[in-house]
Amino acid sequence: MEFIVITLIKIAVVLAIFMTTLAYLQWVERKVIAHVQVRMGPSRVGPHGLLQPLADVIKLITKEGLMPPHANMFFYLLAPFLAVFMALISISIIPFGNQITLFGYTTWLQMTDLNVGLLFILAVSSMGVYGIALAGWSSNNKYSLLGGLRSSAQMISYEAQSGFYFGFLPKWTVFQGPFPQIFSFILFLIAAFAETNRVPFDLPEAENELVAGFHTEYSSMTFAAFFMAEYANMITVSCVATSLFLGGWQPLFPPGLGSDYVASLVFAIAGALCLYHGLNPARKLDRYTLPVFAVVFFGLALIFAIPAVQIALVSVFWFCAKAGFLLFVFIWVRATLPRFRYDQLMGFAWKFMFPASLLNLLVTAFLVAITS
Amino acid sequence: MSGLTALQGGVPVSWYLLLSAILFVIGVSGFILRRNIITVFMSIELMLNAVNLSFVTFSYQLKQVSGHIYAFFVMVVAAAEAAVGLAIILTVFKNRQTLNIDEISTLKN
Amino acid sequence: MDLFFFALFAFIAVICAINVVLQTHPIASALSLVGVMASLAILYLLLGGEFIAMAQIIVYAGAVMVLFIFVIMLLNAGSETASKPGSWFAKVAGIPLLALLFAMIAYFLGAQYPKSEMVQFGTLKDATGDSIGSAHSIGTAVFTTYLLPFEVTSVLILIAIIGAIVLARKELE
């Protein structure tokens, strides 16, 4: 019985944090891309555009939901549901932190603990293809059908190879194991870009290609569902890469060297920066908003300096920091690289990635057999 | 009622086998009664799935792993067969422009 | 709890299977078949076959059925129209013969196991307490006892790939 209660609490917490992260990931993306392109990004709705996701949600909810006349209604409405369902369910096995003991209950910071956990992630991402293929087909629109087929073919090609990137698993970080798993890590990242339909592999859904790909005929909340599914997939894939290659919730250097206090240090620096810019404001409103943020950051730094809280939250901090770094790489690549043409994309998958991943697996297996 | 309390410990193995038989017979009916070549093919996949369920059930009964292995190989062979079968269907469609197996009958008298 | 999950997913599997046969549009049949496979995967989980359940979703529901759906979309297969009158024999004797087939299968399966064991979730363990259906146990078996079928299957897949590519490519004039 207490298992059910604990699990429900974990589900509620993870869901709340995840949905907020989804919304603000979009804000982060727009700001980062804007600053890379030497412009400001959303800055009107709330301080530094922080309420922009809220404005977007309100806009999407109140938009008219046009249903195309000859579309197959059941599948048209099923497709975004499938996409979001698969994207959200894959969060359930990611370990966010160490085993903690709160109020006498010991539990892992992970919703379930399958021993086929990695296979579960592969399985769920295989099912995610259905959302896209069905969306493309049921819209009764040639552009959608083409975009949907291309997008699903791309997803399948890259995901068929993703089983090979996992290399030698028991050592968790990139630098341990028989030899550094950097090659696997890079291949996995490339496959992750293709899986989530992000640049440079986003031809099937780019705004200036094929109208808009498989979500041409979707508007308002159904479009929001696809968007949400894409960002959720991005977050999931970053979390998986963090768990497999970057060491998960373990700190970068042992706690003996003070890694427990890195969280407080980071927040204190952020607070100091906000305070400095608040006192020399670039814009008029910054004089009032930035000091408030500074106070919040200093408060967080103080909270993370308490040892009792540290036991519970430092592992989560490290995990989120690493996953956040990977998400930043996703956004950074989007701002920087042009996109592949579709035939180049598929050729790259089958002629380069597949042999490379097989070679990687063989070399790793060989080295494991030799060294043990 | 005592039969119902006896069920609290789990589900009898024979119920799984019965489900497998039901799915198999539904697959056979689809195979025989449908005219669209793709639906016929899907009924074959349904039959293969029913057999897989039988394999896994017997593996549970005998507490061995070989049932799982056989089911795995059936899955792999079914995937290979689906690939080739669909390629054949594509070729048939290219040549005859129809997916109705009643009309692909030029080999008959 | 086991009974509830078995009843629920067996019911879903049977309904989806009947739907596969009864739907006129191939896409609806294909998606019902995906429903059958997903509920069968959950039944495999109940039977302790974790690896098989995941393999079912990855291979069957996630690859083979996507291939089916691709082909249906590419061929633009519409709803099945009623063909010229089928054989009266199939219409008259079809259902009774199917019922006979079911009775035969059920008899053989039922007569063999009058005292059947109870399936409980999480009880498929061998003598040392490890789960039999886990990836570790299946991997060990495949690479030791069943190595030859494994290698032969890989050759089979290679042949299937070559065959599919040759059949489906454009004709070179």
Image (cartoon, rainbow, N blue to C red):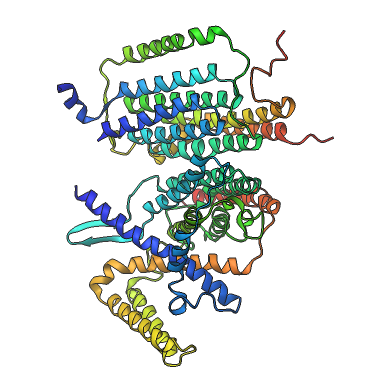
Counting labels gives: 0
Residue A60: image x %, image y %? 47, 60
A244 up-or-down from A307: above or below: above
Q: Nearer the viewer, residue A56 or A317?
A: A56
**In the image: residue A367, left or right of residue B51:** right
Residue B15: image x %, image y %? 31, 23
**In the image: residue A165, left or right of residue A320:** right
Query: Of all residues shown, which one is farthest toward the left?
Result: B2
Residue A325: image x %, image y %? 48, 68
A229 up-or-down from A50: above or below: above
A185 up-or-down from A313: above or below: above
Residue C137: image x %, image y %? 39, 37
Q: Nearer the viewer, residue B42 or C146?
A: B42
Query: Of all residues shown, which one is farthest toward the bottom?
Result: A280
Quarter where residue B102 is shown: top right
Q: Residue at x 60, y 79 (%)?
A: A38
Q: Nearer the viewer, residue B32 or B52?
A: B32
Query: Of all residues shown, which one is farthest toward the right?
Result: C173
Can residue A322 be seen at all in this image of the molecule? no
**In the image: residue A226, left or right of residue A150:** left
Q: Residue at x 76, y 36 (%)?
A: C170
Can residue A331 be seen at all in this image of the molecule? yes
